[in-house]
Amino acid sequence: MGPKHDVLGGGLAVTFGLALLLWLIPFHVSEDPGLRLPVSILPRIVAWLLIGLGTLQMAGGVLRLSATPGRAELLPDRSEAKMVLLVLVILALAVTGMSWAGYLIAAPLLMAALAWIHTPSAPLRIVLAALLGPGVIYVAVRFVFERMLP
Amino acid sequence: MSDILLQAAGAAFQISTILAVLAGVAIGIVIGAIPGLNAAMAIAVAVPLTFTMSPLAAIGMLVGVMKGGGFGGAVGAALLNTPGEPSAAATALDAYPLAKEQGKPRKALKMALYSSVAGDTWSDIVLITFAFPLAKVAGQMGKVEQTALILFSFTMIAGLSGRSLIRGLIATLLGLLFALVGRIEVGFAERFTFGLLELSDGLPIAAVAIGVLALPEVLIQIVRGRGGGSEGVPTGDNEPRGSKALTFAEYWSARWAIVRGAMIGTLIGALPGLGSSVAAFLSYGVSKRMSRHPEKFGKGSLEGIAASESANSAVNGANLIPLLTLGIPGNVTAALLIGAFIIHGVDPGPAVFTKDAPLIFGLFIAMFIANAGVLLIGNFSLGAFALILRTPGQVIYPLVALLCITGVYISAGMGLMGVWIMLVFGVLGYLMRRFDYSVVNFVIGFVLGDAFEQNLRGSITILHRDPWHGILNHPFAIAMVALTAAVVLAIMVRSIRGRF
């Protein structure tokens, strides 16, 4: 990992630490007056440590950047990140689909979509996998583990 | 004592327990053999399968997955030069040349299998020998000592398991923070629940672990369109009959490499943070230096395979020493096992040896059953490994993604909400991988977060009147804090020296 990753990663840690101190802890941590120590003490310690460590990481990145000016460095592969986002959207749609239409409808569609993204060929194999995979899982969960699926 | 042993043996030798352990071994070998997947992911995916089982069968199954996964990693290393586990990378240095270039895949796999089981069995014996006395000592520790010990473990794991102490600490802190979600142990105050009733009991470990460990890897494999369906996997079908088998003389010639590997693996496994990759490479290096034929290393040396496999498998049993005696996981598989213990109502730590003694003795027996299972299943399925590796990734990875969703749905106990949580942590896990933050540290921070907070609160209550004099009554805690500072200093000095 290069200096740009340090600057960006450290920046994210500092931002998250600040978000904790300024928003998340004040508005989403309730206190219990009966306790000796405030409920928010550990989250506050974590927030300050994130800010401190993030700043150190950023500073290290900046120093390394200035020591090697003009050095080309690739940030995370954007095309891969876009595809991962697409798969996550498909997963989210499948989960929503499971609550509306049920596992036996949504799971084969999800399986087929993911198999197509992995390798867009061999449609017969995709159809078979999309039918057999979720079918076997459903039967195992329903009858072996005796649990219900949506 | 004899009653407890009989009770433990009775539970361990029940057919349901044996089948669960063997099923775990088979799952571990298969998942460990698939490039891109590993034992930790196998355990994360297998946790939901254990929900309807007894605690012994459940934990025995997961231990089986861990042991099977350890050997499974060697399969991809030998046949594809793509280790399923990072620790099997050292195995690949010799197993692949032996399998591919010399055309002896079965010999390579058998050497890996026998060395792996030998290392594993040795470390289990060490675990059983030392766990009880260590647990007795650990049982004397109070909250102040435990807080200092967890702090030391966090620092060790953060500093040694990744390339950067700062990144390691940030990852651990994030895990710790997410462990704080929900209602606190005493009282009614809540943290970060955003008004959602489902989050009152905290985030489910299955959803978090599968989210950060398994899902990002599966997503990456799916979008890259890689993995599985590997053509040209050496099957050894054309091997001359005589050269297929590993002779006793060949195995015996590597005995010292196995002994050294087992000892190194056990020592490293007992320390938090170092892990099986360090053990495997260290053992490989030591064996190469001490071998009569160092020139053969890297060209298909049986000693090289034995050194690496015995060491990385010996880490398995030794990892359970800090887990069972102190309640502190040494690596991510141990962290997941802690999660499984908690899910099944068992609190790992020194008290477990008195409170749940039959379970612990039963677990020790189950570990030996698992070793026998790895030996049997590994031996009889050598021919099937090529088939596993030839199964198209187009089928494997979507199936694993579906297993993740299904597993979290049935295990998290909060319906599809658990699956949504897994997806959120999947995104976090992906970002952490891309920015080189250790998900291992994250999971360990998450698993230990609750215990850390409880001990910290207890410590502050004990020390609040006169902290400076009070701490003098806790020499072990002082030693741990000093060690923590020494570790931080040593890592900083190493990092500065490395830079200039």
Image (cartoon, coloured by chain):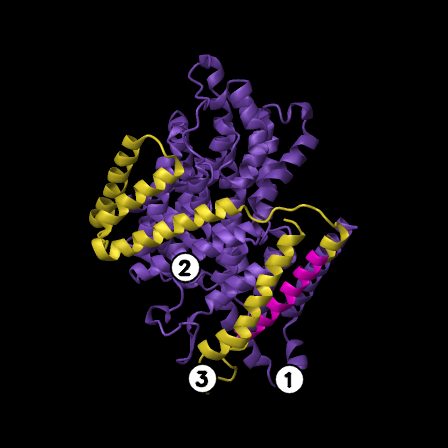
Chain colours: A yellow, B purple
Q: Which residue is mark 3?
A: A32
Image coordinates for residue B313, horizontal then vertical, percent: 52, 40
Secondary-structure class at tag 1: loop
Secondary-structure class at tag 3: loop
Secondary-structure class at tag 2: helix
Question: Is residue A81 positioned above or below B310 on the image?
Answer: below
Which residue is rendered at x = 49% and y = 60% of the image? B327
Quadrant of the image containing the N terminus of chain B: bottom left
Can you tell which mark lies on residue A75? Answer: none
| Residue B316 left/right relative to B295 | left
Q: Nearer the viewer, residue B392 or B156?
A: B392
Q: Which residues are magenta?
A: A42-62
| A46 part of magenta stretch | yes
Q: Are marks 1 and 3 on the same chain?
A: no
Answer whether residue B1 is visible to the viewer in this image: no
| Mark 1 nearby-residue class (10 Å; few <14, some 14–19, many ≥20) | few
Q: CA distance from mark 1 to mark 3?
A: 24 Å
Amino acid identity at mark 1 = Asp
Q: Which residue is mark 2?
A: B205
Nearer-N-terminus badge (2/1)? 2
Q: Nearer the viewer, mark 2 or mark 1?
A: 2
Amino acid identity at mark 2 = Ile
| B119 part of magenta stretch | no
